[in-house]
Amino acid sequence: MSRTTRTVRPAVTARLAAVVALASAAVLGSAIAASAHVHVDPATTVAGSYSVLTVRVPNESATASTTQVVVDLPTDVPFTYVATEPVPGWTATVEEGDLPAPVEVAGATITQAPLRVVWTADPGEGAGIADGEFQRFAMSAGPLPEAGTDVVLPAHQTYSDGSVVDWDQVAAGDEEPEYPAPVFTTTEPADATAEPAAGTEAATAEVPADAAPAAEAPSNALPISLGAAALVAALAALVVALRSRRTR
């Protein structure tokens, strides 16, 4: 008995292609949205260490440039040392002051600490972060608090038109707030008694305060990877559907 080959209708193919496009756009769109805010990338999160904290600031205004960035430092788990990396076209200031209450850090009770870091664009034409641009601001800070601590660094972004965006909201669950504050969580130090793997040296738990920033991995790498995986899966489903219909 002969088998009749049936041609897949263009309308069916178009609908399947639309499903693929919508699925891919949804996943990749979430990745873009997740990266479109002020973010912090610590070079290390090991408790007790000194880390280079890189604050990434995208400009989100089509009509104004970012002229000032202020990052509030924690006062409940304060840093005793903060230094900034020079950024061409910007002036950085570390402001110190009294803590709301005395805090014990590394066995010592402190009443004053760095409270905030202010980056201000130097005056002049083209100053600041323009539309479609972003800037990284790095600072060395420490020592980091005990493992499992969420270190929140609220940021305040000032535009050339006088408007200010406060990135100071802390997520209450899995859903990200509209204006999330930069945050990272400290981790346990490496086991000093563990033997290093062959051909390697044991890692130190503390990073010197003047250490150079580690290479930054894109913060949206995971969402983009998931988006790529979703696209591949959707394309595979389209191929299977087309073959199945041709067979029938």
Image (cartoon, rainbow, N blue to C red):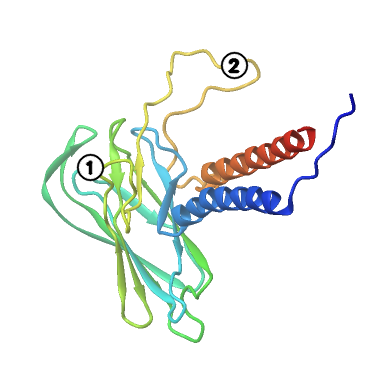
Of the 4 image quadrants, the one containing the C terminus is: top right
Q: Residue at x 63, y 51 (%)?
A: 15
Q: Is residue 61 left or right of residue 198?
A: left
Most extreme residue toward the bottom is 125
The x and y percentages for residue 180 are 33, 54
Q: Secondary structure at mark 2?
A: loop
* Amino acid tagged 2: Ala
The x and y percentages for residue 181 are 31, 53
Assess disc 1: are there few (<14), some (14-19) or many (≥20) residues with their C-alpha within 10 Å of its C-alpha.
some
The x and y percentages for residue 114 are 25, 54
Circle nearer the N terminus (2, 1): 1
Q: Is residue 154 left or right of residue 39?
A: left
Most extreme residue toward the front is 1
Identify residue for label 2. 197
Assess disc 2: are there few (<14), some (14-19) or many (≥20) residues with their C-alpha within 10 Å of its C-alpha.
few
Q: Residue at x 18, y 36 (%)?
A: 108
Q: Secondary structure at mark 1?
A: loop
Identify residue for label 1. 77
User: Which quadrant holds residue 188?
Assistant: top left
Q: Is residue 135 left or right of residue 97?
A: right
Q: Residue at x 61, y 39 (%)?
A: 229
The x and y percentages for residue 119 are 38, 67
Q: Which mark is residue 91?
A: none
Q: Residue at x 39, y 33 (%)?
A: 46
